[in-house]
Amino acid sequence: MAAGNFKDKDMQSIIGWILRVGVIVSMTVVVFGGAVYLYRHGHSIPDYSAFNGVPQFVYPSNIISGILAFRGRAIIQAGIILLISTPVLRIIFSFIGFIIEKDRLYTFISLLVLLIIVASMLSGHAG
Amino acid sequence: MSVIVLTLIILVGSYFAGLLGSLTGLGGGFIIIPLLTLGLNVDIHYAIGASLISVIATSSGAAAAYVKEGITNIRIGMFLEIATTIGAFMGATIALHIQTHYIAILFGMILAFSAVMSFVKKKQEILPEGSPMADKFKLNGSYPTPDGVVKYGVRNVGGGFFMMVFAGTISGLLGIGSGALKVVAMDSIMRIPFKVSTTTSNFMIGVTAAASAVVYLQRGYIDPAISMPVVVGVLLGALSGSKILINARSAGWLRWLFTIIVSILAIQMIYNGLTGRL
């Protein structure tokens, strides 16, 4: 099944590495953003008893401008987006791996999973 | 309560949730959501969002370790992720439209089910051959054991796939990994060996959660200030849990303790859902 030097074992170690690095990097960003947030807002009184959709930290443009303004919550949100991207990145790399292995069926299956995630992303934006 | 106090309480609570979740294999989300909603009066949408993020962190962290050992079946995982991501997308979409007290009641029921499932005695024979469908999708595999490499066959692919759509829907609806349902699909229906099914389930949880997290993120369910202590606490707790598991085998009483806690939480969630307080 495997072609050339690239085998399932190589894919496993690459996937393991991606997941590990993804978690470490995103958690570092989250903790750093958390420290900034607590430093700036640690003594205010929050109220989370009603849902209001935190619109400030939903759109990418707001998050980017928030990071530039050194806002803690925007930095945390960026870390969370990195964390959500980690499993998605894992699928992208499996997709490439299956292409190298010339496993057509699983190249298609990885692409399908990726498309479902993209579709749910787009639906969240539109509806 | 100031931000600093609230953050510290959530951090400590999440640590113990991650610890217990990892020791019992039920996952941290089960304690986080009642802690935030019942204990700290946080809206259930924020609780679900934060829990889902912690699920991605712990499952990715654990999967990174398992996948290198060669026990995880990447093809089974990838194939069933078609089912779980479709389910997760549906679940997250339903969650946007149903009233929160239904979510609370359903949460309590799944919680009780998972607690019972963790006590059911497991017995399983490894099948040498898979079904024609499993052959077609290359799902049969092998994994290393102390006594050498064991080959296994997979059965009832359609039934397992259908169950995974349901597991994904519950995950997207409630913000949990729904590991107990995934294990039902893989162990009981598809007859995948325990070691392979638990690690592969863990491998899939991150992708499943990501599919609903992208919806939640855009709808503002994921509040950074709440998610931050939850994800950090649960991840650290789960790390300590995995260390304890290696060092000590006396997790028996912990399992009982956890089941008692979980049962009380399940009843409380259902009660608060029925009375319309959540």
Image: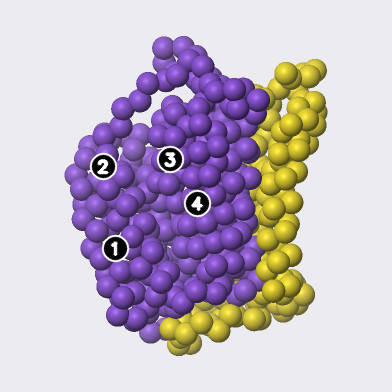
Chain colours: A yellow, B purple
Camera-near label (4 vs 2) is 4
Measure the C-alpha gap from mark 1 to mark 4. Answer: 20 Å
The disc at residue B119 is: 2
The residue at 69%/43% (across/down) is A91
| Residue B99 picture location, percent across and down | 46, 77
**Could you classify mark 2 by the number of other residues whose Cα lies within 10 Å: few (under 14), some (14-19), or many (20 or more)?**
few
| Residue B156 picture location, percent across and down | 51, 31
Dot 2 or dot 3: first in sequence order is: 2
Dot 3 or dot 4: first in sequence order is: 4
Circle 1: residue type: Ala
Q: Are marks 1 and 4 on the same chain?
A: yes
Q: Nearer the viewer, residue B275 or B155?
A: B155
For disc 3, the marked residue is B183
Residue B24, quarter of picture: top left
**Could you classify mark 1 by the number of other residues whose Cα lies within 10 Å: few (under 14), some (14-19), or many (20 or more)?**
many
For disc 4, the marked residue is B166
* Pointer 1 chain: B
The residue at 55%/67% (across/down) is B94
Q: Secondary structure at mark 4?
A: helix
Circle 3: residue type: Val
Dot 4 or dot 2: first in sequence order is: 2
Q: Nearer the viewer, residue B93 or B33?
A: B93
Q: Is residue A29 above or below residue B71?
A: below
Q: Are marks 2 and 3 on the same chain?
A: yes
Residue B217, quarter of picture: bottom right
Q: Are marks 4 and 2 on the same chain?
A: yes
Q: Is residue B272 visible?
A: yes
Q: Is residue B190 above or below residue B25?
A: above
Q: Secondary structure at mark 1?
A: helix
